[in-house]
Image (tube, helix red, strand yellow):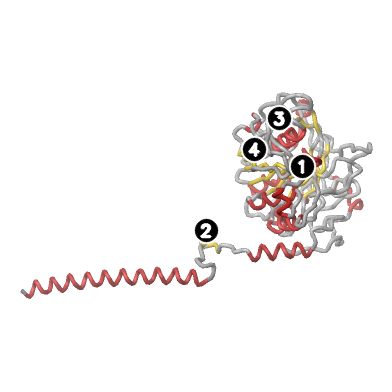
Amino acid sequence: MTVPPVGSARARLLGVALLSAVMVGIAFPAHAATAADDGQWWYDVYGVEQAHADGWTGEGVKIAVIDSQINPDLPVFADADLTVAPGASCEGAVPSTSELNDSSRHGSTVTALLVGNGAGAGAIRGIVPDASVTFYGTGPLEQCTDSAEAQAAGLSAMLFQIERALDDGAQIISISQGGGAEGLRGTEVIARAVTEGVPIVASVPNRSSEGGGVPNGFRGTVAVNAVDRDANLLIGDLGVPNANPWTTVVAPGSPFSSIGAPGGTWDDSNRTAGSSLATPLVSGILAAAMQKYPDASANQLLQSLIHNTGTEPHELAYDGENGFGYGVASLRSVLAADPSVYDDVNPLLDKPLAQLPTDEEFAAAEASVSASPTPTPSSDGAPEDAGDGSPFGTIIVILAVVGGLVIVGAIILTIVLVRRSKNHAKEQS
C-alpha cells in the first residue's frame, strides 16, 4: 500500500475552482409527492427497487453496524440476517433492549435503513436487505465510561467495537455516531482497517459549529454528511448549512421516517434527519457494489464511490469549502461503473485536514498483515494446506503419497508373483 503524504497537492483537491464539476448532476431525479410524504423518498430516488430486481441486495456481504443500542425483535427485522454481538463497550450498558429510548430508537432506525423489510412503524425498507449485519452496541457515548474490556485493550468504547468487528470478519463498518479516540491503540485500529481493506463509513457531526471527529476525521475513512430531497445540506445549529469540511460524500438524510418516537412507543414514528441516516445508505451502496463486483478491491470500490457521484458523469473534484466533498453518493452510478478501471489505492489517505493515522502507523499495520500466514491458492482456487507452514510441508505430503503408492505396488506385485509360483508348481506336479 502506497501512502501519499498528508496534504499532498493532488488534482482531485481542486476545491471551489472545480465546484461546477462536482455540482454537475447533483440534483436528485424527480420524485412523486407520496414518496416524500412517507419519509421514504430516498428509496425511489436511489432506484433501490430496480437494483433489487437486478439482484443487487447485498447478499453475501458482512456489514458491522456500530451504534448505541438496538431492538432486534422489531417487525422490521423479521427474517433479516441480523446478529447482536454480546456485550456493550460502555460500562453498565447493554447492546439490545426492548425499551424505547433515544439510543435504541437511533440504532434500530439506522440498522433498518440497511436491512429493514418495511414492516412496522416507519415502514423502513433497507437498501441491502439480504446483507449479513452484526450490530455492536456501545451504549450512549455521551455518558460512557469505557468497559473494563475496552480499557484492557487500550481502546475507547467505539474503537473497541471496531476492532471486534475486524476480528469477526466484517467487510464494511457503518458508524452513525461519534466518540472519543482515547486509548493507546486508537489510530492503530483505524490503520488496520484501512490496510485490510475494510471501509469505515462514518457520519460527520450535525452541528455547524463542529468540524471533524472520530472516526470520520481519520485518514482512509468515508465521512458522510446529509442532504434533503432537494440536495441541499441540512441547516445546522448556527442557522447556516452544515458544510462540514471533512465530508467525503453526502447522501439523503432528511426528512426520514423513524422507528418509534420521543415520548411514544415502538408503534409510533416521526420525521427525523441527520448524517446518521445518510451513513447506512453509503454503506449500502458499497455493499451492493461489493456483491456485484466481487473481484474489485475495497480501495477500488471507494474510488468508484467518489468518482461516480451525482446523476451525470463528471471529472473528479473535491469541494471542502461548501461541504459536499466529492458530491452526492449514487447507488445507480456506482453500480453502473466497473471499479476495475481504478487504482487499487485508498483515495482518502490524504483527505484534507486529517493527520492520523500517521504514515508510520500505516506501515506498521501493513507489516503486520504481511507477516500473517496466508494460504496458498491451488489451481482450482481452493487454499492448499502447507502442513508445517513451509514448502517442506508440501514436499513431505507428496513423498508420503508416492511412498504409499510404491508400497501398495510392491504388495500387489508380491501377490501376483506368489500366485504365479503356486500355479507353476501345480503344473509341474
Give the CA distance from mark 4 to mark 2: 29 Å
Circle on res. 424: none
Residue labelled with disc 2: 382
Label 1: which secondary element? loop
Residue labelled with disc 3: 99
Structural crowding at the residue carrying mark 3, measured as other residues with C-alpha within 10 Å and reported as few (<14), some (14–19) or many (≥20) = some
Q: Disc 3 vs disc 1: which is toward the camera?
A: 3
Q: Earlier in the sequence, mark 1 or mark 4?
A: 4
Quarter holding residue 133:
top right
Residue labelled with disc 1: 176
Q: Amino acid at mark 3?
A: Glu
* Camera-side residue of 140 and 261: 140
Residue drawn at (71%, 35%), measured in percent from left and top? 108
* Camera-side residue of 100 and 335: 100
Determine if residue 47 is in view. no
Structural crowding at the residue carrying mark 1, measured as other residues with C-alpha within 10 Å and reported as few (<14), some (14–19) or many (≥20) = many
Circle on res. 129: 4
Taking the image as shown, residue 427 lies to the left or right of residue 164, namely: left
Give the CA distance from mark 3 to mark 4: 24 Å
* Residue 217 x, y percent position in the rendering: 82, 51
Q: Earlier in the sequence, mark 3 or mark 1?
A: 3
Residue drawn at (90%, 42%), measured in percent from left and top? 208
Label 4: which secondary element? loop
Taking the image as shown, residue 407 lies to the left or right of residue 222, namely: left
Q: Disc 1 vs disc 4: which is toward the camera?
A: 1
* Camera-side residue of 142 and 3: 142
Q: Amino acid at mark 2?
A: Ala
Give the CA distance from mark 2 to mark 1: 37 Å
The answer to whether mark 1 and mark 4 are in CB contact below 8 A is: no
* Residue 300 x, y percent position in the rendering: 71, 55
Residue drawn at (67%, 52%), measured in percent from left and top? 166
Q: Disc 3 vs disc 2: which is toward the camera?
A: 3
